[in-house]
Amino acid sequence: MNSFLEIHPEVKQALANNKPVVALESTIISHGMPYPKNMETALHVEQIVRNNRAIPATIAIINGKLKAGLTKTEIELLAKQGPSVIKTSRRDIPYLVSKNLTGATTVASTMIIAQMAGIKIFATGGIGGVHRGAAESFDISADLQELAHTNVAVVCAGAKAILDLNLTLEYLETQGVPVIGYKTKELPAFYTRKSGLNVDFKLDSAQEIATFLKSKWDLNLNGGVVIANPVPSEYQMDYSLIMSIIDNALLEADKLGVKGKESTPFLLEKITDLTQGQSLETNIQLVLNNAKLASKIACNYVKLINH
């Protein structure tokens, strides 16, 4: 067993007994929303996973240890420290480990630690992707490279709407990453159910998705899968309104010279302000919705494996 990795006893027992486990990321706790909303949401997401007969494994790095499954105290630590916690992607992991630091994991680093622990299904809000203007800036999220190589399926409400969604899909296609729409042919755009872009495959049940995942990995086709799960219609935002708000937020980020890993938290906070908190509520609801679907997929997946 990897000496850097600490698996929570409950998660370890579930994995040893081939019980369903769902990985959850921690950037949403530290950088995604303010305290105490972040703490409440993190615990609520874990509860949704339990309610759907799976075991939650929230992932983070605590004092240089890669943690698969956090205690309530550890979640509270990340929630209270907020943005002062290091936002951790693949390149940052060795630094945090070597310095015994604490970090909140992005989609990419959560996938890495989930794979180390043997967790196949992961629920998040939205994946990172190709940023607008990437032709000049080369600003492309490490999440996409991770999806190309790491055998973890990511349930999300599409890619974050602040991105260039068309180029994000092109990049995923190049890397051979399948994008599945759950009960939809259209890629959801995080805050809304529509984007005008198509997913690769529409699948209508958690069982079909689990069968797809098992087939892919049984064929030794390495890499992840994006499972796009639209936000429930009663919580989605008006498409043209949110797009104009995002344009304004992007202009401001450009003016202030906000770049790299700072850009997503800056833009999400700006959008929360401009929508008077409505986008935050949508964000919470879509994460809960993704946790529910991920749990159902995890339950079906272990049934296939145990068969």
Image (cartoon, helix red, strand yellow):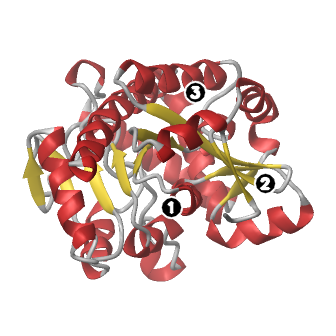
Left or right, 157 with respect to 47, comes to left
Q: Amino acid at mark 2?
A: Lys
Q: Between 164 and 39, which is closer to the camera in this rendering?
A: 39
Look at mark 3 in the image and give the residue it sits on: 42
User: Pointer 1: residues within 10 angstroms few (<14), some, or many (20+)?
Assistant: some
Residue 115 bears which disc, if any? 1
Residue 297 rendering spot, x and y as whole percentages = 27, 41
Residue that appears at 33% across and 39% down: 294
Separation (CA) of disc 2 from disc 3: 20 Å
Q: Residue at x 72, y 66 (%)?
A: 93
- Measure the C-alpha gap from mark 1 to mark 3: 21 Å
The residue labelled by disc 2 is 65
Expressed as whole percent of the image width and height from the top left, the position of residue 265 reads: 61, 46
- The mark total stands at 3
Q: CA distance from mark 1 to mark 2?
A: 15 Å
Provide the secondary structure element on which disc 3 rests: helix
Examine the rendered structure and indicate whether residue 249 appears above or below residue 275. Answer: below
Relative placement, left or right, of 83 versus 55 is right
* Mark 1 / mark 3, whichever is N-terminal: 3
